[in-house]
Amino acid sequence: MALNSDKPLKLYYSIKEVAEMLNVSESMLRFWEKEIPAIKPKTTGHNIRQYTCKDIENIKVVYHLVKVRGFKLSAARKMLRENREGVESNSRVLESLINVRTELQELRRQLDYLT
């Protein structure tokens, strides 16, 4: 059986790992968890948060609205409630564009090095 590279290797991520992925503080993630109903990580008996890939995608959407687009958290909550699919789609498109820009900048640096 071949390894499916599209499937994540971990089922759960700690709050520290998620905070490092998005370059935000752990306390901000806990605050967003209280304010945004879509963010509900699993907790163990000792109140240790375990984030799934779906939880991380929800957090990325909130991050896009609050940190990238500059909305207040209440406006982000309202947008998610009214047009979740549109917001998620815009977030994915923007993330793809940022990745493409990063790759192009790296190619340009390599070409400048050659000339």
Image (tube, rainbow, N blue to C red):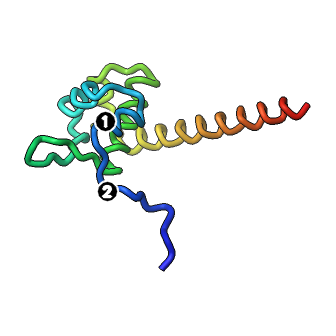
In the rendered structure, which amino acid carries the disc numbered 1?
Answer: Lys
- Alpha-carbon distance for marks 1 and 2? 15 Å
Left-right relation of 29 to 70: left
Which of disc 2 and disc 1 is earlier in sequence? 2
What is the quadrant of residue 67 in the picture?
top left
The residue sitting at the left extreme is 45
Name the quarter where the C terminus is drawn.
top right
Residue 73 x/y as whole percent: 29, 23
Q: Which residue is mark 2?
A: 11
> 98 or 86: nearer the eye?
98
Looking at the picture, does residue 20 appear above or below residue 85?
A: above
Left-right relation of 29 to 112: left
Left-right relation of 24 to 107: left
Q: Secondary structure at mark 1?
A: helix
Task: Tell me which residue sits at (18%, 31%) in the image.
Answer: 34
Q: Which residue is mark 1?
A: 16
In the rendered structure, which amino acid carries the disc numbered 2?
Answer: Leu
What is the quadrant of residue 113 in the picture?
top right
Residue 49 x/y as whole percent: 20, 42
Residue 98 x/y as whole percent: 59, 35
